[in-house]
Amino acid sequence: MAMTKPQGPAAKAAEAAPTSNTTVVGRKAAPRAGLAAFWHSSIGKKWVMAVTGLLFVLFLLFHMFGNLKVFFGPDTFNEYAGWLRTFGDPVLHGDWFLWILRFILVVAIALHLTAAFQLWLRDRRARPIRYASGQRPQANLDRLTTVYGGIVVVAFLVWHLLDLTAGAIGSTHFQEGNAYQNVYNDFQHWWANLIYIVAVAVLGLHINHGFWSASQTLGLNNPRRDVAIKATGSLLAVLIAVGFMMIPIGVMTGIVK
Ligand code: HEM
C-alpha cells in the first residue's frame, strides 16, 4: 500500500527547515518533532505571525468601533467600557472576560514579536551584505514598512496602555473608570493628537502589507483571488486607520464635547 505523505503546516514546516530543525545532543543531532519543529521552522514562524496578526486585526476592528461611541456622549461611551469589563457575566465572573482578552492579546503580541524578530535575524544571517542604498528592490521597501512600522506600533502600544489604561503618562487628570473623560482630556493636547494620528497611519500601512503576507503564508493566494485579497487588506487598513483617527479629530474639532 502506498504511504500518504503527512500534510498541513507542521508537516510543511518539518520539510522546509531541515537545518534549523534539529537539537544537538552531544555529537548527535536529534530531530525536533511536532510543535517544536513547527515553531523552529521559518514557515512555522510565518504561520504564527499570520494567525496572531489576523487575531489582532479582529481586536482592532472591535476596539475601533467601540471607541467610535465617543461620538454619542459620555454615558454611551462609558457604558460600553463598563460592558467590556463585565461581558459574559454571570457565566464568567466579574471582569474575567477582560482578563481572558488581555491574556490572549499579550500571548498573541509576544508570539508575533518573537517570530518577527527571529525571522529578521535569520534573514540578516542569510544575506549579510546589504543592498547599496538607492538600489533597494520593492521587497526591501515592503520590509522597511513592516519592520519599522512594527516597531512604531509596539512603541505606540506601550505609550497607549500607560496613557489610557494605567493613566501613568499623557493627560494629567486621569479618572479611573471614566474612559470618556480620559480620552477627551488626552486629545486636548496637540502632541497627543499627533502621536495617535501618526501611529494609526503607520498601523494602517503595517496592516495593509501584513494582510497580504498573511494570505501568502496561509496559501490563500491564487491569480483569481489576488486582487480581492489586496483590496480586502487595503480596505481593512483604511477602515482601522481612519476609524481611529476620527476620535482625536472629533475632539480637536469640537464635535466630541
Ligand atoms: C484613537 C485611537 C484609540 C483610542 C481613543 C483608544 C482608547 C482606549 C481606551 C479608552 C482604553 C482603555 C479602556 C479601559 O481601560 O477602560 C484602551 C485600551 C486599549 N487599547 Fe486603545 N485606543 C485607541 C487606539 C488603539 C490602537 C491603535 C491599539 C493597538 C495598536 C489599541 C490597543 C489597546 C489595547 C491593547 C488596550 C487594552 C485593553 C485592556 O486591557 O483594557 N488602542 N484604548
Image: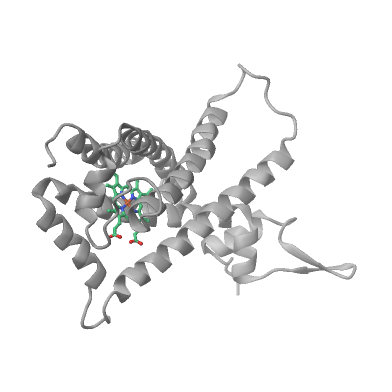
103, 53: nearer the viewer: 103
Residue 168: image x %, image y %? 40, 54
User: Where does residue 8 sit, x and y in percent of width and height?
Assistant: 51, 63
Q: Is residue 254 left or right of residue 49?
A: left
Q: Quadrant of the N terminus?
A: bottom right
Location of residue 244 with respect to 92 vertically, above or below: above
The reply to whether residue 6 is visible in this rendering is yes
Q: Name the quadrant containing residue 204.
A: top left
Q: Is residue 170 above or below residue 179?
A: above
Question: Residue 224: in sight, yes or no?
Answer: no
Which picture quadrant has residue 58?
bottom left
In the image, what residue occupies the spot 64% across and 19% down? 133
On the image, the x and y values in percent for residue 62 come to 25, 55
In the image, farthest residue toward the right? 27
Residue 19 drawn above or below residue 22: above
Residue displayed at 67% across by 24% down: 131
The C terminus is located in which quarter? top left
Residue sitting at the far front: 172
Position of 52 compared to 28: left or right? left
As rendered, which of 95 and 186 lies closer to the eye? 186
Taking the spot 17% from the left edge, 37% from the top edge, the residue there is 250
Name the residue: 59% across, 63% down: 11
How many marks the image carries: the answer is 0
Q: In the rendered view, tell whether residue 191 sits above or below residue 83.
A: above
Q: Residue 88: x percent and y percent?
A: 23, 75
Return the residue nearer the eye: 91 or 140.
91
